[in-house]
Image (cartoon, rainbow, N blue to C red):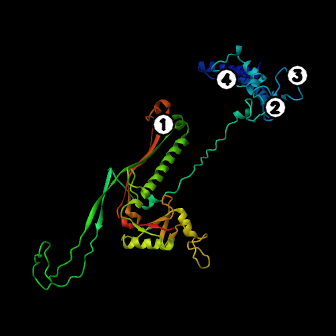
Amino acid sequence: MDPKEKMRAELKAARDIAAKAEAEGRDLTPDEVAQASTHIKAYEDAKAEFEKGQASADVKAALDAIGFDLGLERTPDGEKAKADSYRQPTKLKSIGQMFIESAEYKGLMGQFHGGQINEKARVQSQPMGVKALITGASDTSRGAFVPTDVTGILELLGRRPLTLRDLISVRQTESDTVEFVQQTTQLSSAAPVPEATTAAAPTAPGTAGALVPAAGGGYKPEGTLAFQKVTATVKTIAEWVPATKRGLADAKQLRGLIDDELRADLAEEEEDQILNGDGTGENLTGILQTSGIQTQALVTDMLTTIRKAKTKVRTVGRVIPNGILMNPEDVEALDLSKPTSGDGQFYGPGPFANANIPTVWGLPIVESEAIAVKTALIGDFSKAVLWDREQASITATDSHADFFIRNLVAVLGEERVAFGVTRPKAFVKATIAS
């Protein structure tokens, strides 16, 4: 009897003895204990014999695997034995054809009557060894079945650092328009006033006009104030990209990439608008395009020009400047500048200095690719305000055009903001190179 069948029979006999006693509501008799022990011993002997046979099969499987690793094919049963039991795969046969003609496949199908496999039957064949023809040059190459090693590394092209939003004032709004008031004329008539020496009233002018104060009347000078209301309209900055539903469902990284790229592109456009927007159509009015900001022409060199612009912010703008915005190329030129005569040392901190925040004339330098080369913006950046109406958001829909019937999705990124410069003279646009 097959060891596996003997195991099953002996175990059933032992269980039947125990089941009989349990059905009668009693313990096992001494004879029943002896009989059950005999069956259990026979079961253990059959199990040991089965495990020996299984170990032999494992050894054979290991040998088959070794042959597979060496690129050899096991000879089918009935073939004339060779020096070893493996051979090189037939060159004119595909891997699939070699498998269905192999002894392993025939042995597998021989287990099922008429070659019909029941749906619930467990199916497993012995491995068939073939030489690894990983050439990728023909239809019979095994290279097509080698899985790709997906590393998960995603290297983007990179985007410029954004700095301007961190400099200016950022506030919130729940309206589509924002209003603020600017002072256009400042009091400037204050003067010393002598004691009055007469109580005479003003006299009428000879023709038409204002009354004429009496001399020595001790009149105080009158000052003048003027203001204007400025309205900033909320504008929309947006962009969308098409994607397939399958791509969004099967590749979470793709969805994240779209989100990140869209948000980053919106932020770049926002910085350009804050600085350079011309105010036409849906464009914001940027700092450099705001009416009333000061200008400073190039004087001698970059350092001199920046210093004069700093003075204008202080004396005309009546604020203390807190930064200077420059293009990275101009910052490089500033760092590399040297006196025309001297020991050849750099004006700047030098190549070995640890300057986390570089400065010029006491002002921190902020680099931005949004500002043109040869131009610098000096000022108090708290006087520029961005109002967030709707912060950057991402929306996906298949309602665009015929996307619904094509399984496409439009992924939209947008934000709504308003921007204004509350004190234009707090900024000076300086030309720092010819």
Q: Which of marks 3 and 4 is nearer the N terminus?
A: 3
The answer to whether residue 192 shows anywhere in this view is yes
Q: Which of marks 2 and 1 is nearer the N terminus?
A: 2
Q: Observer-nearest residue: 96 or 420?
A: 420
Nearer the viewer's eye, disc 1 or disc 4?
A: 1
Residue tagged 2:
72
Nearer the viewer's eye, disc 4 or disc 2?
A: 2
Dot 1 and dot 3 residues touching (CB under 8 Å): no
Distance, label 2 to label 1, CA atoms, is 50 Å
Circle 4 sits in a helix, a strand or a loop, which is it?
Answer: loop
Q: Earlier in the sequence, mark 1 or mark 4?
A: 4
What's the residue at 43%, 71% (across, down)? 309
What's the residue at 76%, 22% (across, down)? 3
Q: In this view, does 406 lie above or below 326?
A: above
Residue tagged 1:
409
Distance, label 3 to label 2, CA atoms, is 16 Å
Amino acid residing under circle 2: Leu
Left or right: 89, with 221 as reference point: right
Distance, label 3 to label 4, CA atoms, is 32 Å
Left or right: 296, with 107 as reference point: left
| Residue 378 x %, y % | 44, 67
Dot 1 and dot 4 residues touching (CB under 8 Å): no
- Mark 1 Cα-neighbour bin, 10 Å: few <14, some 14–19, many ≥20: many
| Residue 308 x %, y % | 44, 73
Residue tagged 4:
122
Distance, label 4 to label 2, CA atoms, is 27 Å
Which of the labelled discs sits on residue 293, or is there none?
none
Which of the labelled discs sits on residue 80, or is there none?
3
Q: Observer-nearest residue: 144 or 273?
A: 273
Nearer the viewer's eye, disc 3 or disc 4?
A: 3
Find residue 345 and report its image quarter: bottom right
Q: In this view, does 319 lie above or below 249?
A: below
